[in-house]
Image: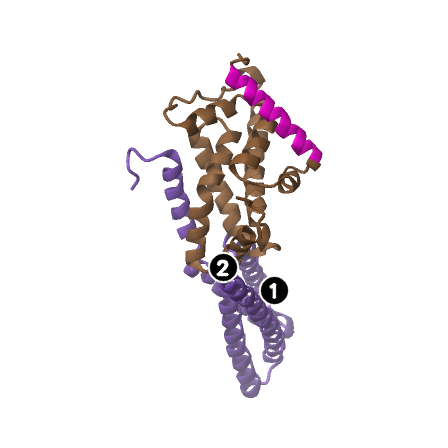
Chain colours: A brown, B purple
Amino acid sequence: MNPESPSHLRADELLAIRCQLGERDAFDALIARWHEPLWRYLRTLCDSDDTASDLAQDTWLRVLRGIAGLREPARLRPWLFGIARRVAMDRLRGNYARAMEGGEALEEMPAPEPDADLESDLATLQSDLDLLPIRERETLVLFYLRELGIDEIAALLAVPAGTVKSRLFRARQLLRDQFRGDLP
Amino acid sequence: MSKPNMSPQMKSLQDVRALAGAQLSLKARLGYVALLLAAAAMSTVILSLWITEPALPSRTQVAFGAMTLIGISWMGLALWALSTRRVLYARDRVIAGGMAVAFTSIFVVGAGAAVAIANNPAAYGALFTGAVMLAVALRVWAGARRRFAELSVRRAALAGA
């Protein structure tokens, strides 16, 4: 399944244009289609389900307020993930600044909560991903789970395509090592 | 109400749907359009009276100044809300443009009647400002209808493909 195929791009564009027109049921369809992928992406960038839900609310608020001005409706997918990423980064920056103001050392900041529910494969994958460095984790998630192309990820993360490829390579290697039990 | 065994994603989806329901309320958005138009009309009338009456007592001038400031503040609030908080989509912009044209037309007719009956400078000022507002409203409405038509054409093409 190629997310950059003409039929996918057409479907995305149609949904975005219906939202720009102000069709109420198009917003329902947009949320039904994209909420879970966005939530899962945000979950890889934060340390708890509650934070991911909170970030998802902020993301959707920005989406609802910004979609009327979306210039390229066919680029809906990278636009959505770009907003989610900015929301998550704003939060991380805010947390970091608060921690510094309060004199809290980075080592004392709460560690990611251990994933207690490892019943499903998806939950197992999530906990494995949590152990990867954030840049590699994010790139891997965008490429394999969110099905964005190399160029789209490069635009989203504001890095060259070559950097995306090298991060993907490193992420795959780390994950492979992890599966073999090489990581602590 | 959320079920106790609902997954975090589903709970979050429910919250987002509630958020969208509140955000997409047409009544709330058109309320800001009505506020903008009413504040613009109020400011115009007061400003016309203030500028064209030569010998107003200083207390009246202060009162007019305060009321104009209040009107402009309401306009600022409505414009801020419509550009950042309760944005208008293409269809809403057509409705809002129509509201603006209807409202400013009524204002111009009223100011025209005041000119015919009272023939004072304040009425002329209100008529002139009303005419400018009507021209702006017509331009905004035409732009909104053009944008709506463009999007509708593209929508039909994509839906038919």
Q: Chain of mark 1?
A: B
In percent of width and height, residue B147 lies at: 58, 66
Tell me the SS state at disc 2. Answer: helix
Magenta extent? A162-180
In percent of width and height, residue A38 lies at: 49, 40
- Residue nearer the viewer, B124 or A26: A26
- In this rendering, is residue B113 above or below B38? below
Q: Does residue A36 show up? A: yes
In percent of width and height, residue B65 lies at: 59, 62
The total of numbered circles placed on residues is 2
Q: Residue furthest front?
A: A1
Q: Does the magenta run of residues contain B1?
A: no
- Residue nearer the viewer, A12 or B110: A12
- Residue highlighted by disc 2: A18
> The disc labelled 1 sits on which kind of residue?
Ser
Q: Give the main secondary structure, helix, strand or loop, of the magenta stretch.
A: helix
The numbered dot on residue B58 is 1
Q: Does residue A94 show up? A: no
For the residues marked 2 and 1, what is the alpha-carbon distance in whole angstroms?
Answer: 55 Å
| Front tag of 2 and 1 | 2
Q: Does the magenta run of residues contain A177?
A: yes
Q: Chain of mark 2?
A: A
Q: Residue at coordinates 48% horizontally, 40% vertically from top-left?
A: A37
> The disc labelled 2 sits on which kind of residue?
Arg
Q: Residue at coordinates 42% horizontally, 22% vertically from top-left?
A: A115
